[in-house]
Image (cartoon, rainbow, N blue to C red):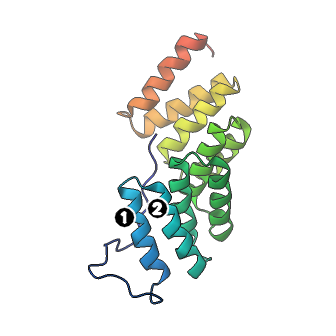
Amino acid sequence: FILPKISFGQNQIPLEPLKIGTQTSNDWVVLGNSKFDTKDFSGAIGYYNKAIELDSLNAEVYYRRANARFNNKEYPNVIEDCSAAIKLKSDFSEAYFVRGNSRQNMKDFTGSIADYDNAIRGKPDFVEAYLYRGNSKQMVKDYLGAANDFSTAISINPKYPEAQQSMGDLHREVGDFS
């Protein structure tokens, strides 16, 4: 599964150790990103927790922690973090997307579809959101809706193999569904 990229400015590892008590929220984010990049998701969560302690109004930090938690399969916590990010930044398409993925993994397909709707509303060319919404629609047997989403994903990116594969799987599952 592909997480959308989001940039946060300079994410360089400090060359010198941080002095105790002088860390900023961004310092902890940088350290968390470093742990995330090495797939130490629990370590990343710890650093993101410290960043949130210093700046609880930074939607991107909640989103970062949600991604680390997603990789640890902590889906209820992912939903909580994405909801916090969305509360702070209502048009945060990537947070809706990750929350939708967690709901999809928890078999809450109706909830995931609603989140993907919001992700797409904020970012109409969000190809991954169309693919995953199509997958959720297929699970609730909305085959025409799934086909439309897969088609849209393919029209946005004709070389998107996951969307082509999903469309093929849908055709094999239901045949002619028009």
Q: Give, as a three-letter code, the residue at label 2.
A: Gly
Using the image as rendered, state which of residue 155 and residue 27 is in the foreground. Answer: 27
Using the image as rendered, state which of residue 31 and residue 147 is in the foreground. Answer: 31
Residue lying at the far left in this picture: please name it. 15
- Is 131 placed above or below 124 here? above
Which mark is nearer the camera, 1 or 2? 2
- Left or right for 155, reference 143: left
- Is 88 placed above or below 99 here? below
Q: Find residue 106 and report its image quarter.
A: top right
- Is 91 placed above or below 11 here? above
Residue ID for mark 1: 34
Q: Quadrant of the C terminus?
A: top right
Residue lying at the far front in this picture: please name it. 20
Using the image as rendered, state which of residue 162 and residue 145 is in the foreground. Answer: 162
Q: In x, y percent, where is residue 103?
A: 66, 43
- Is 75 placed above or below 174 here? below
Q: Give, as a three-letter code, the residue at label 1.
A: Ser
Q: Residues within 10 Å of mark 1 (few under 14, many from 20)?
A: some
Residue at image coords 55%, 19%:
170
Residues at discs 1 and 2 in contact (Cβ within 8 Å) = no
Q: Residues within 10 Å of mark 2 (few under 14, many from 20)?
A: some
Q: Find residue 20 and report its image quarter.
A: bottom left
Q: Helix or strand or loop: what does disc 2 sit on?
A: helix
As measured in the structure, the alpha-carbon distance from the residue carrying label 1 to the one carrying label 2 is 9 Å
Residue ID for mark 2: 43
